[in-house]
Image (cartoon, coloured by chain):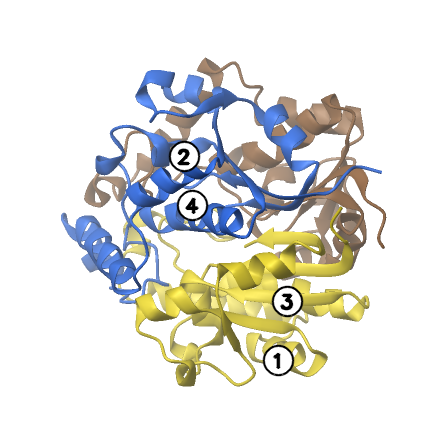
Chain colours: A yellow, B brown, C blue
Amino acid sequence: MIERKNRLAIIASKGTLDMAYPPLILATTAIAMEMEAGIFFTFYGLNIIRKDRKNKLFVAPIGNPAMPMPMPNILGMLPGMTSMGTMIMKGMMKKANAPSINELLEICRESGVRMIGCQMTMDAFGLKKEALIDGIEVGGAATFLAYAAEAAVSLFI
Amino acid sequence: MIERKNRLAIIASKGTLDMAYPPLILATTAIAMEMEAGIFFTFYGLNIIRKDRKNKLFVAPIGNPAMPMPMPNILGMLPGMTSMGTMIMKGMMKKANAPSINELLEICRESGVRMIGCQMTMDAFGLKKEALIDGIEVGGAATFLAYAAEAAVSLFI
Amino acid sequence: MIERKNRLAIIASKGTLDMAYPPLILATTAIAMEMEAGIFFTFYGLNIIRKDRKNKLFVAPIGNPAMPMPMPNILGMLPGMTSMGTMIMKGMMKKANAPSINELLEICRESGVRMIGCQMTMDAFGLKKEALIDGIEVGGAATFLAYAAEAAVSLFI
């Protein structure tokens, strides 16, 4: 029988601003609860840990009828509406006193959240390690699975 | 070593009609198998448990090439196409004899599925507890993680 | 206490080309690490195991601001842009020396990944077992949960 540690193992695969919060909030909360936590950033999730992230994380109002303020697709299509969706999301998270993505990443780094960038996706996207923020380890699906096999909780986000 | 209970812990983060089914179907199936089950509703997933949900859960055909009947984006953009996608999905689930979202929520409540609304997202969206259906507990990421740490199965939907 | 096997249990619910890779890559990696692995294909995830899959798996650039080369929604809407997004994704995966979806499915089959098609979704979509590739077992949410309850790692993709 495999050991079960008090550990949270997350795959972060989405690169939109809204889906950048859950892995970071869950990992930092886990640490606060004295669990171990690790995040494997893969596919679009790599956007979260890019140095030039500021220009990479958006919320697209189009094709997203679940936005708190959904707009007709024909409006969401207009240039500028993606940045408006992004602004709305940032404003909402601030209203809830949630830390920013930048602050969450800093807490992750300082509190010892293990952060792994997916080698295969980095190759696919032509991303070098230097393009990622500091403190990122590079690994593959096997690195994640070995870590997750002993985790109490595993989540694909 | 952490105890491992015969328990299913779900995060429901999506607010589209199609992605409202999986958490509810999985939780009610778990109960039928004599497992414990709990769902943490966060981000757009809060839509599933809003009293005014009827007007909130849609399927957007746009940007969704995996729809059974995908349509060109230029068509999906036309006003009315989101409600057509929604109608198609409801018809398909009926054909499969699947209960409606309303029925599934009722079974959840009656069979003791633990249902938690995410405090932080409620603050961000400006949602009060009164806006949610009855029987919802309000909590945070820590509430979910404490529950999931002892679960046999955890899923982020 | 439930037994915890060295097993990976995956739900594949997405039918886009980009989200077809993660379940197949994770399952085949698990097998290479001498774990057991199983995938439950449900909702749009059924597209991955359709015989006529070739014409079913796309990447939609619209409403997806996290694409490596995001394009304005107004451009993504033009006919042809979905096939361009698909071509870009295939080219990128090839650059990373990743096997194709076809090759990954073949490895799954040969290495004993348990592959289950969701009965309810098949009914909803009007899909017969004959429409699926060989080697697929048909089952329900209960089949998946019974398998996942003993898994070390469960993921909803």
Q: Earlier in the sequence, mark 4 or mark 2?
A: 4
| Front: mark 4 or 2 | 2
Could you say which is closer to the camera, residue A143 or residue B30? A143
Q: CA distance from mark 1 to mark 3?
A: 17 Å
Q: Amino acid at mark 3?
A: Gly
Callout in the foreground (2, 3): 2
Residue B89 position (above or below residue A53): above
On the rendered structure, is C10 left or right of B5? Answer: left
How much space separates mark 4 and mark 1, taking CA atoms? 34 Å
Whether residue B153 is situated above or below residue A103 in the rendered picture: above
Residue for badge 2: C109
Amino acid type of disc 2?
Arg
Q: Which residue is mark 4?
A: C24
Nearer the observer, disc 4 or disc 3?
A: 4
Indicate the quadrant where residue C85 lies. bottom left
Do the residues bearing badges 4 and 2 touch, measured as CB atoms within 8 Å? no
Q: Are marks 1 and 2 on the same chain?
A: no
Lateral position of residue A142 relative to residue B129, left or right: left
| Residue B2, label in figure | none
Residue designated by label 3: A38
- Name the secondary structure under disc 1: helix
Q: Chain of mark 3?
A: A
Up/down of B92 relative to B133, above or below: above
SS type, badge 2? helix
Residue A103 circle label: 1
Q: How far apart are the two marked residues, 1 and 2, measured between alpha carbons?
A: 44 Å
